[in-house]
Amino acid sequence: MKNNFLSKDDLIQARERIKNQVKKTPVLTSSSINEITGANIFFKCENFQKVGAFKFRGASNAVLSLKENELRNGIATHSSGNHAAAISLAAKLKNIPAYIVMPHTAPEIKKKAVANYGAKIIFSEPTLKSREEKLNEVIAETNANFIHPFDNYDVIAGQSTASQEIFEEFNDIDFIITPVGGGGLLSGTSLSTKYFSPKTKVIGAEPKGADDAFRSFYDKKIYPSVNPKTICDGLLTQLSEKTFNIIINNVDEILTAEEETIIESMKLIWERMKIIIEPSSAVALAIVKENQEKFLNKNVAIILTGGNVDLTNLPFK
Amino acid sequence: MKNNFLSKDDLIQARERIKNQVKKTPVLTSSSINEITGANIFFKCENFQKVGAFKFRGASNAVLSLKENELRNGIATHSSGNHAAAISLAAKLKNIPAYIVMPHTAPEIKKKAVANYGAKIIFSEPTLKSREEKLNEVIAETNANFIHPFDNYDVIAGQSTASQEIFEEFNDIDFIITPVGGGGLLSGTSLSTKYFSPKTKVIGAEPKGADDAFRSFYDKKIYPSVNPKTICDGLLTQLSEKTFNIIINNVDEILTAEEETIIESMKLIWERMKIIIEPSSAVALAIVKENQEKFLNKNVAIILTGGNVDLTNLPFK
């Protein structure tokens, strides 16, 4: 099976394409978390990225890769999460319309964020079938260009730019860990590691209660995400053809973490680092906490994927 | 009245003395907060400082300025807040004992933080009189060296290093704003501004419900802080002789902010910047929000003083 649908040059070009539009986020360290885990952790703060999540990298690269005539009728997607906000802002910056299909059950705060960027929201039922039907209607009507949240090489190349920035700053990373939902970030990270830091091992981190990527990786076939049970609202989706193929060829391991460790890790990052991350971002640290021996005295890069969380409804007491 | 009890060289030496012990904290910006306020704000993130507050700079400089024979019997202070934790860690790093007088009513979480650094806690009643009596007893018994939270030139010089770092990175700051409680940070900031960025205006920010520094500044005499009513638990103290004298000679203005604006500003920073700050840190942004015309299109540096807050008891809904 081919493993480089995206070349090193594609990744470099993606970085060049979006660099004036995305934030170069800081890498933070915490001596107290290092003491607790025994590892030497470098946290890449994509919670500080525009729209509060790494998703803006992929959305920006996808939009900026389209030709003017492909953008003329706007862009469309279905998402109730960070990709929706990312597409909305990327469209706004290009001054083109964005059509976002969202389940009518999505939290008010997410509807507001998308509306604030000037996107048009089309409500669907909260099923994949209804979302896809609505999306097809919207595309038929508007001729907008569909940008999938992760099954899209331009999106994957955009997500790779977070780890490109890490490897530019640090040349001695033993492990890089990212959470895995649809696999856009993990696949992009695995390619940039292969091209820019080949000695680094790539690990995907998944909640035990939503372990479809873990099983897909080891059984070498895509399992659907059925009834996932986790607080990590960003990790409920399953892998796609494109992300699966890149991941099985370039990722070293997928590990799963207990829900309790994820919540503890989230609280630890809030308390010790004074930064706000969403639950999905805490899975990578949970993996380190549950596998301390593996990471002892190692240089571990972790991508903190986002910081969009309801501040009035925190999972810890 | 003399206005330079601390020379430019004293400030440079303080920076040199503590630079391997304190974190050089990042300066973050937020395009959405800039849009909301119309100003161009540079947030110096002392919430990321060790012990979660700028206080570690002053404590470090004070401890590292003492001679070995002055340190032999340890150091002592009274504080229930960030200075207590800062002194405890600075002592631990020097491998000397720390004696902290704390009101027995202090929050458990603060007692724990200090105990975790290995300091000895001596409980007092929650009055200034009882605290001072207990402290005198401790000093008589131990011969420990007393380090006042702000009425101490080494502490003030240490606090000046936060703004020294700002001015090294940015040479076109129109205003620098810090909250004012006892005045250690404001006085240190005003001196470093005078020496390193004399065109920058220095503003102290105070809650309207605890406006003793505001009144002291304009009436040119120190008022006590009587029954302060504010959520800003770091800003309840009054100015001291040393901080007052520096402030009236080197600060351009003290402005006060409404409690409601402070809470709104705190929430805004959490939501848009994805960082955790304590209420006292939000007063500076509240000043900008309440005086938008003054800061329109200006480069404004704000020191976010700390991030120690009870995550299970947030002031916003």
Image (cartoon, coloured by chain):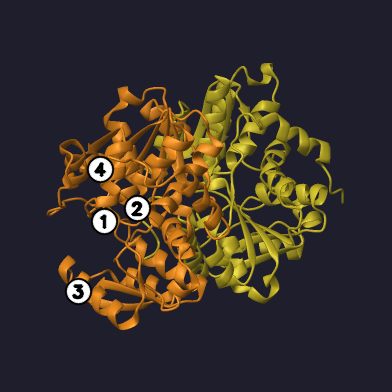
Chain colours: A orange, B yellow
Q: Amino acid at mark 2?
A: Glu
Dot 2 falls on a residue whose secondary structure is: loop
Dot 1 falls on a residue whose secondary structure is: loop
Residue A105 point in image, percent of width and height: 21, 71
Q: Quadrant of residue B91?
A: top right
| Rendered image: mark on residue A133 | 3
Q: In which chain is the residue bearing label 2?
A: A
Q: Quadrant of residue B71?
A: top right
Kindly report the distance in space between the C-alpha atoms of the residues bearing marks 4 and 3.
Answer: 29 Å
> Do the residues at discs 2 and 4 belong to one chain?
yes
Whether pointer 4 and pointer 1 mark residues with C-beta atoms closer than 8 Å, the reply is: no
Kindly report the distance in space between the C-alpha atoms of the residues bearing marks 3 and 2.
Answer: 30 Å
Q: Amino acid at mark 1?
A: Asp
Whether pointer 1 and pointer 2 mark residues with C-beta atoms closer than 8 Å, the reply is: yes
Residue A226 point in image, percent of width and height: 12, 53
In the rendered structure, the answer to whether residue B140 lies left or right of residue A143 reads right
Density class for disc 1 (Cα within 10 Å; few <14, some 14-19, many ≥20) is: some
Which residue is nearer to you in this view: A4 or A190?
A4
Q: Nearer the viewer, mark 2 or mark 4?
A: 4
Mark 3 and mark 2 lie on one chain; the one further toward the N terminus is: 3
Residue at which label 4 appears: A206
Density class for disc 2 (Cα within 10 Å; few <14, some 14-19, many ≥20) is: many
Q: Amino acid at mark 3?
A: Glu
**Viewer can see residue A303:** yes
Q: Nearer the viewer, mark 4 or mark 1?
A: 4
Q: Nearer the viewer, mark 1 or mark 2?
A: 1
**Residue at the (68%, 16%) spot, across then down:** B69
**Viewer can see residue A274:** no
Residue, far bottom: A141
Kindly report the distance in space between the C-alpha atoms of the residues bearing marks 1 and 3.
Answer: 23 Å
